């Protein structure tokens, strides 16, 4: 009888310990309690926004790491390319486009600490520059590894071609801007324009001054220089650089048969610099001492 009582007591102790361990396992990690994606129909130029609601169901403050909420990725980027070291015991949410086979390359964290019992929203942006429907799934990670294998179904996003920008009236010409080339004032036949707050310059004149060739085939504008081929599509923000799709912050446009581009994006892309002097109304481009 005494031996039986001891065995029952041991069994109860083991059961209680196992129950505590199970409860600890269930609550030791936070959980994703909500997710949303907008818009569900977009194009190659506009990013989609993915928002996660993360609840800290542990009994301690948890921490995360960069890339933080609010950052964005293009289709072929990943969090690993940012050069950020994955830190142990840090939580992040990840997004996959093919049920996790790509390793959830798009990941975001939250700033600061998240106290026990609190929730936070983690928002990331993803620009899908290839056409098609995408099935988005999510997962919670800790130290670079999945917290568990429960996949969060986010939804389907359809991607169409970029909406073409139509210019129905003449862009607003800036007050006189006198180009200065090697210290000598010049008077080009086509002046820069202001479009939506951005300075635009004639593409052919710009690229010829940096030693590049430019031609148009009717649908696109092709710029070539040793080691570089850049293909633009007037009215659209995406372009091809050496065969790789890139997204430009502002699209080139064609008016009266002349293609205009924004040097603020093009200059760094081609290894130059750009500086606008509002007092002298000169736009200096760092190629050989010439400027607008």
Image (cartoon, helix red, strand yellow):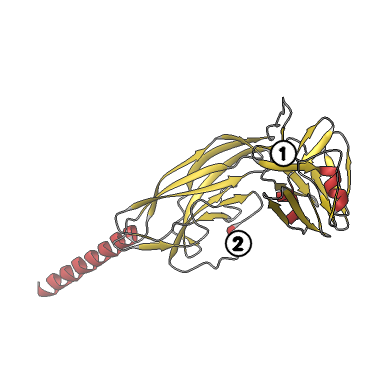
Q: Is residue 219 visible?
A: no
User: Residue at 30% of width from left, 62% of height from top?
Assistant: 24
User: Residue at 37% of width from left, 56% of height from top?
Assistant: 30
Q: Nearer the viewer, residue 153 or 169?
A: 169
Q: Give whichever of discs 1 and 2 has the lower sequence position.
A: 2
Q: Nearer the viewer, residue 156 or 73?
A: 73
User: Residue at 29% of width from left, 55% of height from top?
Assistant: 117
The mark lying in front, picked from 1 and 2, is: 1
Query: How many residues crowd around disc 2 within 10 Å: few (fewer than 14), some, or many (20 or more)?
Result: few
Residue lying farthest to the left in this orientation: 1
**How far from the left and from the top, in percent, is residue 107?**
53, 55
**How far from the left and from the top, in percent, is residue 220?**
82, 38
**How far from the left and from the top, in percent, is residue 50?**
51, 44
Q: Nearer the viewer, residue 12 or 180?
A: 180
Q: In screen coordinates, is 269 left or right of 44?
A: right
Reading the image, the residue beneath label 1 is 175
Which image quadrant: the N terminus?
Answer: bottom left
Q: Nearer the viewer, residue 153 or 270?
A: 270
Q: How many marks?
A: 2
Does 16 sit above or below residue 140? below
Q: Is residue 289 visible?
A: yes
Q: In screen coordinates, is 195 left or right of 41?
A: right
Rendered image: mark on residue 82: 2
Q: In screen coordinates, is 85 left or right of 22?
A: right
Does 63 sit above or below residue 190? below
User: Residue at 58% of width from left, 37% of height from top?
Assistant: 157
Query: How many residues crowd around disc 1 within 10 Å: few (fewer than 14), some, or many (20 or more)?
Result: few
């Amino acid at each position: 009888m005494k031996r039986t009582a001891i065995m029952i007591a041991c069994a109860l102790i083991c059961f209680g310990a196992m129950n505590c361990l199970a409860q600890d396992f269930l609550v030791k990690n936070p959980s994703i309690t909500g997710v949303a994606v907008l818009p569900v129909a977009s194009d190659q130029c506009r990013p989609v926004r993915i928002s996660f609601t993360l609840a800290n169901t542990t009994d301690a403050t948890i921490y995360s790491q960069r890339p933080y909420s609010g950052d964005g990725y293009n289709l072929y980027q990943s969090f690993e390319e940012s050069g950020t070291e994955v830190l142990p015991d840090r939580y992040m949410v990840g997004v996959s486009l093919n049920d996790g086979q790509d390793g959830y390359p798009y990941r975001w964290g939250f700033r600061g600490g998240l106290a026990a019992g609190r929730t936070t929203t983690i928002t990331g942006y993803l620009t899908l520059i290839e056409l098609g429907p995408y099935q988005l799934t999510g997962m919670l990670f800790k130290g670079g590894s999945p917290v568990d294998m429960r996949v969060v179904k986010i939804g389907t996003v359809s991607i169409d071609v970029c909406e073409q920008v139509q210019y129905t009236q003449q862009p607003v010409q800036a007050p006189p801007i006198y180009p200065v080339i090697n210290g000598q004032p010049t008077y080009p036949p086509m002046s820069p324009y202001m479009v939506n707050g951005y300075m635009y310059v004639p593409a052919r004149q710009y690229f010829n001054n940096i030693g590049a060739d430019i031609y148009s085939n009717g649908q696109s504008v092709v710029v070539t220089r040793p080691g570089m081929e850049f293909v633009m599509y007037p009215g659209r923000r995406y372009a091809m650089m050496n065969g790789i799709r890139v997204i430009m912050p502002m699209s080139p446009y064609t008016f009266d048969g002349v293609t205009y581009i924004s040097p603020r994006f093009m200059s760094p892309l081609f290894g130059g610099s750009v500086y606008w002097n509002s007092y002298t109304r000169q736009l200096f481009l760092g190629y050989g001492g010439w400027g607008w």
